[in-house]
Image: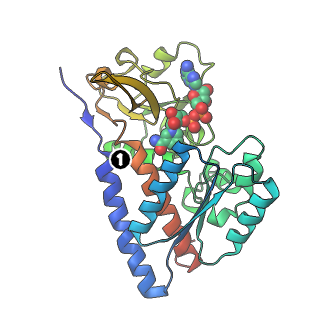
């Protein structure tokens, strides 16, 4: 019985961040430009606050200018749009992101589409989505989680996935669809599956690469996985557990890690896999935007 290689997203992300920090210092020295990241958060959802805090910490450690805009849960849509307009025009800000989800009275699509595409470091603007779908990846801001997954896959299998089959579980705009576009661009033969897919286990069992982005703890089982497959677990699920008689919450992925690691060739853990890569790619996109503002990148 062989265990899969555990893909260490934490170390990979730390290496990327160290590079970004060096490049940030070089940009400041050569062009007096400090990359700036503005994060807009509405309300006081505890999970969103943790994400925003982690992004702030990462931005500061890279040497970025980092600004948080904390808006009341009851903020009106025109007021959010006014803030985005201001950030679009602010030359100290190269990346803008609005932490999702937003309260129900705010229209997520109108708000994310108000961010100017050149500062859309989350890659949610239709212009960036269109470029990604058209294969113009070098010209687009690619959503951070799929971009991070792709780096991990390339580390295992190289940049040309010709002849490989990939199955993506989940078809969200944030993860499933963009990771499928990236895999396709890298020449993999890609299947996107979702909640209406029939006989999911059988479809997955043909794949050399499996990306699970569902939000269901431990859904992907060992008998779904082809021996030696690369398994990327995007899911972040908070599961109640009793430890030493006390109720605690634990983070767990969409893949049954203990089972699947016996069959897979390589697998990301949760936590410590895709999560850290997502933040590192956000920093990479922000640095890229700052370099673009200096005419250093197209
Ligand atoms: P989503 O809810 O928008 O999409 C979930 C997808 O899963 C849908 O397309 C749905 O069709 C599919 N699905 C649901 N039940 C299914 C089933 N039984 N069989 C097959 N497909 C099924 O979620 P999302 O935003 O794409 O996020 C997915 C997961 O990834 C969540 O756990 C989320 O927390 C996590 N996530 C992690 C990161 C990270 O940085 N690691 C980033 C974004 C999302």
Can you tell which quarter of the image residue 260 is in? top left
Point 39% across, 80% down: residue: 26
Instruction: Residue 153: give x, y in percent of width and height.
Output: 38, 43
Instruction: Residue 99: give x, y in percent of width and height.
Output: 60, 51
Instruction: Residue 266: give x, y in percent of width and height.
Output: 30, 34
User: Could you tell me which quadrant the C terminus lies in?
Assistant: bottom right
The 10 Å Cα crowd at callout 1, few under 14, some 14 to 19, many 20 or more, is few
Instruction: Residue 82: give x, y in percent of width and height.
Output: 77, 65
Point 24% across, 35% down: residue: 5
Q: Closer to the camera, 43 or 197?
A: 43
In the image, 285: left or right of 157? right
Can residue 160 be spotted in the picture? no
Q: Closer to the camera, 173 or 155?
A: 173
Point 44% across, 80% down: residue: 27
At numbered mark 1, what does the secondary structure look like: helix, strand or loop?
Answer: loop
Q: How is the image coloured?
A: rainbow
């Amino acid at each position: 019985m062989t265990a899969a290689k555990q893909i260490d997203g934490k170390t990979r992300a730390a290496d990327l961040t160290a590079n970004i920090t060096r490049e940030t210092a070089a940009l400041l020295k050569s062009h007096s430009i400090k990359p700036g990241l503005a994060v807009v958060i509405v309300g006081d959802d505890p999970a969103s606050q943790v994400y925003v805090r982690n992004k702030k910490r990462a931005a500061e450690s890279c040497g970025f200018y980092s600004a948080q805009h904390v808006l009341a849960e009851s903020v009106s849509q025109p007021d959010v749009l006014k803030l985005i307009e201001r950030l679009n025009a602010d030359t100290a800000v190269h990346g803008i992101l609005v932490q999702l989800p937003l309260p129900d009275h705010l229209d997520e699509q109108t708000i994310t589409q108000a961010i100017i595409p050149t500062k859309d470091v989350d890659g949610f603007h239709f212009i960036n989505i269109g470029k990604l779908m058209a294969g113009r990846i070098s010209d687009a801001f690619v959503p951070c989680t799929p971009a991070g997954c792709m780096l991990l896959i390339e580390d295992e299998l190289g940049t040309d996935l010709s002849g490989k089959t990939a199955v993506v579980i989940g078809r969200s705009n944030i993860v499933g669809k963009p990771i499928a576009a990236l895999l396709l661009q890298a020449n993999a033969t890609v299947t996107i599956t979702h909640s209406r897919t029939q006989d999911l286990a059988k479809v997955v069992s043909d794949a050399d690469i499996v990306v699970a982005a569902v939000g269901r703890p431990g859904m992907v089982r060992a008998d779904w996985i082809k021996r030696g497959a690369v398994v990327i677990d995007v899911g972040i699920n908070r599961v109640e557990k009793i430890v030493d008689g006390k109720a605690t919450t634990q983070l767990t992925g969409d893949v049954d890690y203990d089972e699947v690691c016996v069959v897979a060739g390589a697998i990301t853990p949760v936590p410590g896999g895709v999560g850290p890569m997502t933040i590192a790619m956000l920093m990479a996109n922000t640095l890229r935007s700052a370099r673009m503002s200096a005419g250093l990148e197209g």
